């Protein structure tokens, strides 16, 4: 997996050239190139590979996913949203470049990502590229990521239109699982997989995304700044609706374990040491607490 992460980093650096006006490209590249886990690009590449595609075809989509993810992190850290001064162990984008440039850097990443898919996806058919762009726009917008963020903000302000558990599931599915779903769906489309296979991987990503967010909620309670690279304890201190605040630590851990077990079962039939390694890592961390 380390080698794949290195290759993703290399491609991100290659695709994101700094040109005039340099300030915006520097702001975009700052958070993008900080060391993240690169889970979404890795999942896209690995899904494409296990379903029979040459992974070289998947690098533009994989890097586009990381750009979309980084855009969401930059905007999430803004004072008008989660107001966090640190990301990936370093000062957040707006702390370094100012709020206006951080907003614009996010916007620029959001729009550069599909441009990259169109310009660099050599070897994919026009139909595949249109399908990738359709998935991207659907999952990034008000039917996905933005919907999750809006309901998260509303729930923090005490506005709950649905029950707490339905609200929490909606937030987790749309804020977190959505980009893992997009990752595997894009990988499967690149491999020209059938709708049935796409749905199978989608189901894996939904469960993985929920487990990942439960993990994130647990870590916010018990981890350290050094380990996470961002402020910890914020959810608890702000009275935020999380899996832990709603159900308690033990129920959260149990739900996490069930979801991860279901993830292993879905990918069992595929020869993917990387997807299994991702599950092992997440599982191992919760297993030890
Ligand atoms: C799409 C226009 C548009 C706006 C985005 C701000 C926003 C709307 C959404 C927020 C989404 C968000 C920040 C979700 C949190 C998901 C999460 C658990 C992130 C951490 O992911 P990791 O641990 O991070 O994979 P690294 O740094 O390793 O990549």
Image: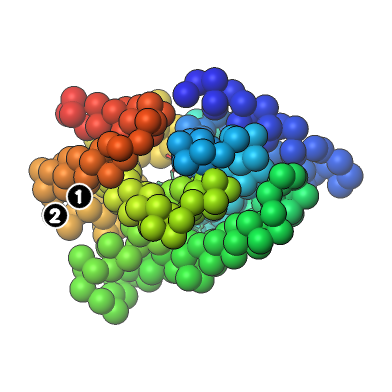
Which residue is farthest right? Answer: 20
Q: Position of residue 104 (x, y in %)?
A: 70, 56
Observer-nearest of 119 and 256: 119
Judged left or right of residue 147, residue 243 is: left
- Residue where numbered disc 2 is placed: 247
Determine crowd level at label 2: few under 14, some 14-19, many 20+ residues with C-alpha closer than 10 A.
few
Q: Position of residue 222 (x, y in %)?
A: 24, 35
Determine crowd level at label 1: few under 14, some 14-19, many 20+ residues with C-alpha closer than 10 A.
many
- Residue where numbered disc 1 is placed: 244
Judged left or right of residue 234, residue 114 is: right
Place residue 253 in its image quadrant.
Answer: top left
Element on which disc 2 rests:
helix
Q: Position of residue 255 (x, y in %)?
A: 16, 48
Q: Are marks 1 and 2 in contact (CB under 8 Å)?
A: yes
Q: Is residue 70 visible?
A: no
Q: Position of residue 286 (x, y in %)?
A: 22, 32
Count of number-bearing discs: 2
């Amino acid at each position: 997996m380390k080698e794949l992460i290195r290759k993703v980093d290399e491609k991100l650096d290659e695709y994101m050239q700094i040109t005039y006006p340099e300030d915006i490209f520097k702001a975009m590249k700052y958070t993008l190139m900080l060391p993240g886990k690169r889970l979404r690009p890795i999942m896209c590449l690995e899904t494409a590979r296990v379903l029979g595609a040459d992974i070289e075809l998947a690098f533009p989509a994989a890097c586009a996913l990381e750009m979309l993810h980084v855009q969401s992190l930059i905007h999430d850290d803004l004072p008008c949203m989660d107001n966090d001064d640190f990301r990936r162990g370093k000062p957040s984008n707006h702390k370094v470049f100012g709020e206006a440039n951080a907003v614009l850097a996010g916007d620029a990443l959001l729009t550069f990502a599909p441009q990259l898919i169109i310009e660099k996806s050599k070897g994919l058919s026009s139909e595949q590229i249109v399908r990738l762009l359709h998935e991207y726009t659907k999952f990034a917008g008000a039917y996905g990521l933005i919907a999750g963020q809006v309901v998260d903000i509303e729930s923090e302000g005490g506005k709950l239109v649905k029950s707490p558990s339905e609200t929490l599931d909606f937030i987790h599915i749309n804020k977190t699982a959505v980009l893992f779903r997009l990752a595997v769906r894009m990988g499967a489309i690149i491999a020209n997989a059938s709708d049935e296979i796409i749905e199978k991987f989608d189901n894996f990503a939904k469960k993985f995304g929920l487990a990942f967010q439960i993990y994130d909620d647990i870590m916010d309670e018990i981890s350290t700044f050094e380990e996470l690279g961002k402020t910890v304890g914020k959810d608890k201190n702000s009275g935020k609706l999380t899996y832990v605040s709603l159900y308690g630590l033990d129920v959260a851990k149990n739900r996490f374990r069930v979801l991860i077990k279901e993830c292993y079962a879905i990918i069992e039939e595929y020869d993917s040491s990387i997807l299994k390694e991702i599950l092992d890592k997440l599982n191992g961390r919760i297993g030890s607490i």
